[in-house]
Structure formats: structure tokens, C-alpha cells
Image (cartoon, helix red, strand yellow):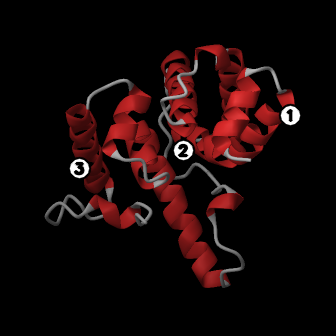
Amino acid sequence: MSEADWVRRARAGDDAAFSLLLETYQSPIYNLCYRLLGEAGEAEDAAQEAFLRAYAQLASYDPGRPFKTWLFAIANHHCIDRLRKRRLTWLSIDDDLPPHPALQEQAPGPEEALVRREQSEMLQVMLARLPPDDRSVIVMRYWYDFSYEEIAEATRTTVSAVKSRLHRARNSLGEMLPGAARAPRPAARSVLPAQG
């Protein structure tokens, strides 16, 4: 059965079909929330709330749109609302932010594991310093490989606005890299996940 069939059945009231959609998107939605909110417990709450909202809004879902984009839009907007409400507290370099286990490859050596953890912590701190709208476009582009059009749809903006936000966010991340004040602006992509 295809995703479109699951969505059609879920819209018709089949809770088992919605459960299959939840299982499919549980990790990606949690990871999006974690990258936007920076805290595992809050990310779990936000992901759960996003699925509850999606379930409640299934009747208004337009089957002509990709379900994934629609679901990511719900989660993205919920996380941005949370960030606006909590008056974001900036994280310092000393804060301990362990990377989510699903984002790491299996069994790296001790030295590689330490380097990866330090890079992940540094990136999470840098992401937390970006404005919520810039952070969300970075996460959707580099963690989920969304196209500009998909990001524009999920953020309810234009493709040119998405490109502008990505440019601004990459520049901001580049300026936050160690040594950025001494050297010409480094390429921020070096700390972002490689695109497929």
C-alpha cells in the first residue's frame, strides 16, 4: 500500500492507516523539532503535538500537496511558535547538548565519536543562535534535503525569500565558526550535513 493510500484511508477515519504514517514520519519530525528547539524533551512534546494537530486537520489536507511537506509545515510552525513563546535563552559553548542517537552512524571509534560529538554540539549551539525562521530553513534544506519550493510551501513564503534566508543563515553560521574573525568568511556548508 502506498503513502497516498494510507493518507486516503486516514482521512476516511482509519486510525491504523494514520498510525502507519506516524511510524513513517516519527523520526524525521522529531529530528526537525530537536534541531529547531535544541532540547530532547521539548522536541518529543513538539513532535507529539505536531502529529495531534495533523490528525485533527486531516480533513483539511489537500491531497494535491505532498503529505510530507504538509506535515513538516505543521511541525515547523508549531516549533517556531514555541520558540517565540519561551523567549529563547541563548546557549553557551559550555552547555551539554548530546546529539540525538539517530543522527550518528553505528560504532565510530572513540576519537571519531568525540570529534563528531563536539561538532554536533557546536552546530546545535550555532543553530540556537539563529533566528527561528532562518534555523528552520537550514534544517529543512540540509537535514531533510527539501527543495526551495518545498521549504517555501512549508514556511508559507516565496522561493526568493527562502533563498535569502538560507544565504543569511549560512553567512551567520560562517561568522560563528572558530577563527571567523581572523580569516575571510569560511564556507558555512562545512559544518552542515552533506546534501544527497
Which of the two labelled residues, at mark 2 and mark 3, occupies the earlier sequence position?
Answer: 2
Q: Is residue 58 placed above or below 75 in the rendered structure?
A: above
How far apart in space, not on screen, are marks 1 and 2 (Cα)? 29 Å
Task: Residue under label 1, please give it.
Answer: 16
**Left or right: 151 with respect to 104?**
left
Amino acid type of disc 1?
A: Ala
Numbered mark located on residue 171 in the image: 3
**Left or right: 164 with respect to 11?**
left
- Residue at image point 68% right, 48% down: 27
Amino acid type of disc 3?
A: Asn
Give neighbour class at mark 3: few <14, some 14-19, many 20+ (Cα, 10 Å).
Answer: some
**Left or right: 188 with respect to 136?**
left
Q: Of 24 and 94, which appears nearest the observer? A: 24
Q: Is residue 25 placed above or below 193 in the rendered structure?
A: above
> x, y percentage for residue 19?
81, 36
- Cβ–Cβ under 8 Å for marks 1 and 2: no
> x, y percentage for residue 171?
23, 49
Task: Residue under label 2, please give it.
Answer: 35
SS at badge 1? helix
- Cβ–Cβ under 8 Å for marks 3 and 1: no
> x, y percentage for residue 192?
40, 60
- Residue at image point 34% right, 33% down: 152
SS at badge 3? helix
Which of the two labelled residues, at mark 1 and mark 2, occupies the earlier sequence position?
Answer: 1
